[in-house]
Amino acid sequence: MSNKKIVFINPPYERIAKGYDFVKHITNNSPSLGLLHLAAEVRLHGYVPTIIESDIFNLSTDAVMEEVEKVGPAYVGITLFTVGVWNALTIAREIKKRLPKTVIIVGGPHISSMGKETMERFREFDYAVDGEGEKILVELLQVLETGGNPFSVPGIIFRKGPFVHQTQGKAVNKDLDDLPMPAWDLLPDFPRAYIPAIYDYPRGPVATIAASRGCPFHCKFCDTSTFGSSVRFYSPKVVFQMMKHLREQYGVRHIMFVDDLFVASRLRVTELCQLLIESGLNFTWSCTSRVDTIKPDTLELMKKAGCWEISFGLETGSDVLLKKMDKAAEVEKSEQAVNWTAAAGIRTKGLFMLGYPGETLETIEQTKAFVRRIPMTIMNLTKFTPYPGSPIYRDLYGTNIRDDHWERMNGMNFVWAPDGMTVDELDRHYQEILMSFYNRPKLGLYYASLSIRYPHHLLRLARFGLGFLAAKIRSYAQGRHGLLVQPGASPH
Ligand code: B12
Ligand code: SF4
């Protein structure tokens, strides 16, 4: 019988900027849902999948290789975010050295946005799947197994002789209900090891679900190349079944919906809410929304159904910048949505970015004032990063492949600075904005009461606090005046 084993790898990535190591105590540890979906689909077709979550378990390349060798697979599938490409390459090189017959297949957002260039550049990757991989991966494995013709598989990129070929099409799942449930059973130590960021969930265990794919908007900083602009939904019934399964099998109590735009269809959200209310399962959950897709009556129902937090991409307190981002939103609308959300008793997580082209001292001040005046409970500030696949990437770099910053494209490094600002200045503003939001008695009281209700967050916070203090002391001792970003972390 042929070897049907396939090892899926989520490679390690630099997720924390140099100098900010203490942040690891409070950050998110979510698994790759993509790999869970792929593993479930290939298993349905007779393959034997294993999943390695190298970052969550802090595995070095050697440790990953040890696990791969233990399995002895015919195929390895690696998921590629731009930030993880170089580490994936190191792993692929080792696999080629130690298990030369193993076929290496890659996919994920980096491939969806820059597949051909990546395959031309890195000979260690044998095949790449462009887009949503479930069906195409199975087709590809079957062709490889039977010695068929890869040109017959749509939406793949591969090398034949000196040339890289790309077949027509991009993999899209039109009907999500057709897909098997993600293979949570293959995740080592699930759900215990997969905790979200501190204070971003009330109580565990926690699991993630993508209840829809795609987003019809075109914000210039956003890489939508995997799912595209046509939105597809799981039916509310199937989403509910997944949640029920997670409760019955793993005791999961909180769900994080990671859809690009969970509240894209109010009808669908209403149906899911009704199912949850009738079930009496008492889930809490969080989701994403745009500020213009939410209304007070829907919010009320969502609250009743256990909605705990909504993430809004608020981005900035400046209308000028929102316009430059093609966000199709206004600060006033953002404020209204956050007010409505607070009035319904749901927390707002505001997603912001600093350093977008056009950022000035004035827009920074507007953001500082904005975050202090809205009733938001948690703020996530990203350092602007032009990801391949986003329209702004093309504006800034053209169509040329740029690989000099990939390993730092984690939203925690300024790999690009707007005119008239240095990375050090931006880093200082970064800290100031966060401090101006978090350093308020009202918010302190809120978090204190949350900690009393859910004390497991306190331990995480204590570790983070001690780490921050140590980093500050080190910075002053080294003459860096309290700046935490390490020398050498500025753009070239
Ligand atoms: C949930 C999420 C996370 C989670 C989980 C990450 C993970 N490993 O899956 C957390 C919070 C940890 C996270 C972290 C980061 N994320 Co994130 N994240 C998302 C989000 C919102 C949903 C991803 C998801 O679960 N989708 C559902 C599953 C089913 O899809 P999928 O993982 O893409 O997998 C499908 C295909 O890509 C493909 N595929 C994937 N891998 C493979 C492998 C093979 C072999 C094959 C054949 C196919 C294949 O088939 C899968 C099934 O259809 C997306 C937004 C989006 N629209 O994609 C951003 C997104 C993927 N994240 C992004 C970024 C930048 C990051 C971070 C670098 C920093 C940050 N700002 O958060 C880190 C890096 C993480 C890492 N491991 O490298 C960018 C990626 C841009 C890029 N070019 O790299 C996205 C696209 C957001 C955006 N619109 O800009 N993220
Ligand atoms: S930022 Fe949000 S609304 Fe804008 S394109 Fe990306 S997913 Fe869609």
Image (cartoon, rainbow, N blue to C red):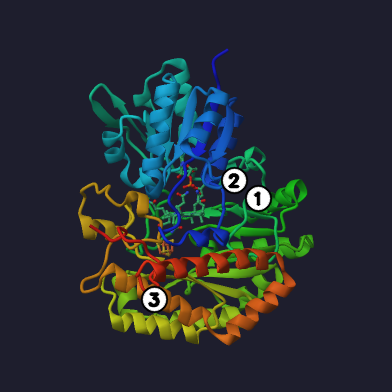
| Nearer to us in this view, 205 or 233 | 205
- Of all residues, the one furthest to the front in this rendering is 477
Amino acid of disc 3: Thr
Earlier in the chain: of badge 1 and badge 2, it is 2
Give left or right: position of 437 versus 47: left
Secondary element at image label 1: helix
Q: Give the position of the C terminus as an image quadrant.
A: bottom left
Residue at the spot x=69%, y=53% of the render? 243
Does residue 56 appear left or right of residue 399 in this picture?
Answer: right
Nearer the observer, disc 3 or disc 2?
A: 3
**Pointer 2 local density, CA inside 10 Å: few below 14, some 14–19, many at least 20:** some
**Element at badge 3?**
loop
Question: Could you give the CA–CA distance between mark 1 and mark 3, rounded to whole angstroms?
Answer: 36 Å
Image quadrant occupied by the N terminus: top right
- Residue 199 in sight here: no
How much space separates mark 3 and mark 2, taking CA atoms?
Answer: 36 Å
- Badge 2 is on which residue? 177
Q: Neighbour class for label 3 at 10 Å: few (<14), some, many (≥20)?
A: many
318 versus 309 height, above or below: below
* Residue at the spot of label 3: 316
Instruction: Give residue 238's mark.
Output: 1
Q: Are marks 1 and 2 in contact (CB under 8 Å)?
A: yes
Quarter residue 325 falls in: bottom left
Q: Residue at x 63, y 41 (%)?
A: 187
Q: Are marks 3 and 2 in contact (CB under 8 Å)?
A: no
Q: Position of residue 31 (x, y in %)?
A: 56, 48
Residue at 61% in and 31% down: 44
User: Which residue lies at the image location 39% right of the left edge and 49% below the top edge?
Assistant: 83
Dividing the image into four quarters, tell me where ligand 2 lies. bottom left
Q: Nearer the viewer, mark 1 or mark 3?
A: 3
